[in-house]
Amino acid sequence: MTIQPGNFAELSDFALRRDELRHIRQSLHSNPELSFEEHQTAAYVAEKLEEWGYEVHRNIGGLGVVGRLQQGDGTRSIAIRADMDALPIEEATGVSYVSRSPGKMHACGHDGHTAMLLGAAEYLARTRRFNGTVNLIFQPAEEAGSNSGAQRMIADGLFQRFPCDAIFGLHNHPGAPAGTFLMRSGALMAAGDTVRIKIKGRGGHASRPHLTIDPIVAVSNLVMSLQTVVSRSINPIETAVVTVGTIRGGSASNVIPDQAEISVSVRSFSSQVRSLLEQRIRQLAASIAEAHGATAEVEYELGYPVVSNSEQETAFATKVVTELVGADRVSVCPLIPGSEDFAYFLEHKPGCFLRLGNGEKSAPLHSPQYDFNDENLTVGAALWARLAERYLLAGQGGEDVEHA
Ligand code: NI
């Protein structure tokens, strides 16, 4: 089959589908489902994909859905992912399509992410101007925090069952103008880890401290010493955050308690820095406890890893978004200290996670006032359609990416 260069999806191809995409997005918004509970959302997505002619696979890694579409004899394959889950937040947007489930809302725009990918799905199945395999991944439980949807889908054989050469995903970005893209090669979003440290001493009467091992003094010392981890151990051109978020110990002013504990949030943008932080935090906890005659119990829980975009795929995606919306609507994305479980996909496949402006006046993500910007629906759908067409260019497989 022959595809003329330049004959790729444009924003105008989606103009007539604006209302339909808005309807899909707003009905997802009205029916939010939390992580691991996306039954209706997954069923709706699967039904739509089937209707359009996709080979549909349900219940992957829980409630994950994959829609597969093959065209021509091309051997290349692409994966594009959207997340489907909502958050346990009471909505306060006042929109007409407000959440019908009290205490649950789409406060991170995953309703929009799902609607945009469905928009591209319909277009790709109808026009079929590509040569190869498209795998559309609708992922549950992005917000789970640990053992999330991405991890579960990968553990369930996602990439063995649906091989792909590269994977792409997108998140909306409050604060940036709608319809603009923010791109970054390499590290984009932070790894976020949680540490709980318990200092065990020996309690007693406040008037007789010499008969005790005071965990309050030891833990205070530890909190101060943790402030030196980033400033003294991390290369100044790298960045990281160590925040002690909670401190607990004791119940009365005249009692020295047996133990005291803190919890710490740790953010980093490279695996080297991430493991150095763990090493230093463990070392400080053990040695400061020991210096006080106490012991330290450290529970180090690794959260989502760094979202790290590969160079070629980022250059390719940047080229596609620039063609689509114009260079003045594409900028370099700053490092984002938040985390995202798309990071796990990027540990297995090269790819790129993009950010799409949600409007300068948009409420922040995870806020009760947040709402996905419907102006973006056609932009996002056109992006995914064009990206797939470009990536699976007939007869020129691979060229597009390698020469990007
Ligand atoms: Ni999100």
Image: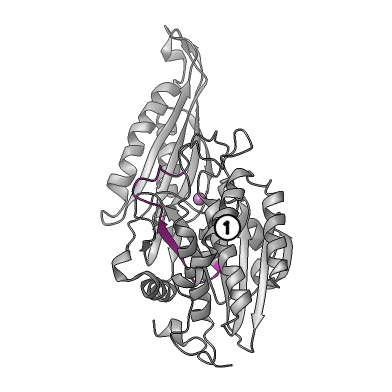
249 relative to 137 in the view: left or right? left
- Give the x, y percent position of residue 391: 50, 80
| Residue in the image at 31% along x and 49% along y | 233
**Location of residue 270 with respect to 15 vertically, above or below:** above
**Which image quadrant for residue 155?**
bottom right
Q: Residue at x 55, y 33 (%)?
A: 90
Question: In the image shown, does 147 or 384 lie closer to the viewer?
Answer: 384
- Asked whether 400 or 263 is in front, the reply is 400
| Closer to the camera in the image, 16 or 7 | 16
Residue under circle 1?
A: 114
Residue 395 percent location from the top left of the image? 54, 92
Left or right: 301 as drawn, with respect to 246: right
**Kind of residue at disc 1:** Thr
Residue at image coords 57%, 65%: 119
Q: Which residues are magenta?
A: 348-365
User: Image point 58% across, 54% down: which residue?
Assistant: 23
- Quarter where residue 130 is shown: bottom right
**Left or right of residue 379, residue 124 in this image:** right
Q: Assign a secondary structure to mark 1.
A: helix
Report whether residue 146 is seen: no
User: Residue 285 at x, y = what percent?
Assistant: 44, 37
Q: Crowding at label 1, few (<14), some or many (≥20) Cα neighbours within 10 Å?
A: many
